[in-house]
């Protein structure tokens, strides 16, 4: 039985382990396609146009945005980011599951433009633990740790309207919870629209 694709949005404050968890999801379930966003920021070393992002100019971005090209868009750290609507719809119609790594402003728009999108929020176990993980990266200055903790406070206040909360206290347990949340989504009737009709048909055939 062919089921429809699931749009899975995963948000988390910086330092919560989102990247590790999403990589694991894609590695275990090849049915996932990663949504490739458009951005106006410059490519970082190692990033490939069309694979990591579609890198476009601010003028091009605004033109596309005004033409309704994006399912959602946001300005993050002074750059624009947006998710192409049509490409997403095509993947979902093909039965692919689509994973979105977008910020909370984008997630709130996607709830409306992609009805049925599942919104998962990864929470840190505590403020102290998040602070210690940010420091442990050794890439953050004191100022950037303080900035990220402040940003986390604002982002956590948006977690209320998500469908699933996962606390990343222990990575293996957070992974089990993410996997369970995804598998539960695949069992929803919205995702298996023809299943019951096909089953019930057997009764109408049997009744003849
Ligand atoms: P980076 O520039 O480090 O790749 O991403 C910066 C932030 O932009 C991350 O929080 C990421 O989740 C967010 N982001 C990436 N693509 C999109 C997008 O298409 N839409 C929105 N709203 N945010 C995005």
Image: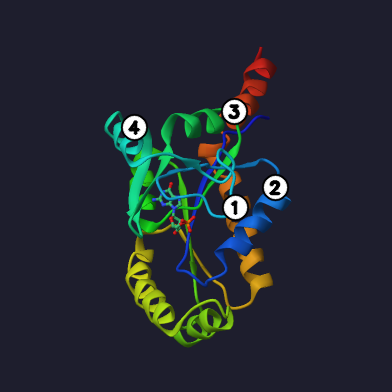
Mark 4 sits on what residue?
64
Secondary structure beneath dot 2 equals loop
- The Cα–Cα distance between marks 3 and 2, rounded to whole angstroms, is 16 Å
Q: Which of marks 4 and 3 is nearer the N terminus?
A: 4
- The Cα–Cα distance between marks 4 and 3, rounded to whole angstroms, is 24 Å
Mark 1 vs mark 2: give the one in front.
2
Name the side, left or right, on which 53 lies relative to 107: right
Mark 3 sits on what residue?
94
Indicate the position of residue 136 as horizontal and vertical percent values. Answer: 58, 83
Secondary structure beneath dot 3 equals loop
Q: Earlier in the sequence, mark 1 or mark 2?
A: 2
Mark 2 sits on what residue?
29
Quarter of the render that holds ligand 1: bottom left
Q: Earlier in the sequence, mark 3 or mark 2?
A: 2
- The Cα–Cα distance between marks 1 and 2, rounded to whole angstroms, is 10 Å
Task: Tell me the quadrant of the picture where the C terminus can be found.
Answer: top right
What's the residue at 51%, 50% (across, down)?
43
Secondary structure beneath dot 4 equals helix
Secondary structure beneath dot 1 equals helix
What's the residue at 39%, 81% (across, down)?
143
């Amino acid at each position: 039985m062919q089921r429809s694709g699931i749009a899975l949005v995963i948000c988390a404050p910086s330092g919560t382990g989102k990247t590790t968890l999403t990589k694991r999801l894609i590695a275990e379930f090849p049915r996932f396609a990663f949504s490739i966003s458009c951005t106006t920021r410059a490519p970082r070393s190692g990033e490939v146009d069309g694979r990591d992002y579609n890198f476009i100019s601010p003028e091009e971005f605004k033109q596309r945005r005004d033409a309704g090209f994006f399912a959602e868009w946001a300005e993050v750290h002074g750059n624009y980011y947006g998710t192409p609507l049509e490409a997403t719809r095509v993947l979902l119609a093909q039965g692919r599951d689509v994973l979105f790594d977008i910020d909370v402003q984008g997630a709130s728009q996607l709830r409306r433009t992609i009805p049925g999108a599942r919104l998962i929020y990864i929470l840190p176990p505590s403020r102290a633990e998040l602070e210690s993980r940010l420091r442990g990266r050794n890439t953050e200055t004191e100022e950037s740790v303080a900035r990220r903790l402040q940003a986390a406070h604002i982002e956590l206040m948006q977690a209320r309207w998500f469908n699933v909360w996962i606390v990343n206290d222990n990575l293996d347990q957070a992974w089990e919870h993410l996997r369970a949340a995804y598998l539960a989504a695949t069992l929803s009737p919205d995702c298996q629209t023809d299943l019951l009709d096909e089953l019930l048909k057997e009764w109408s055939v049997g009744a003849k």
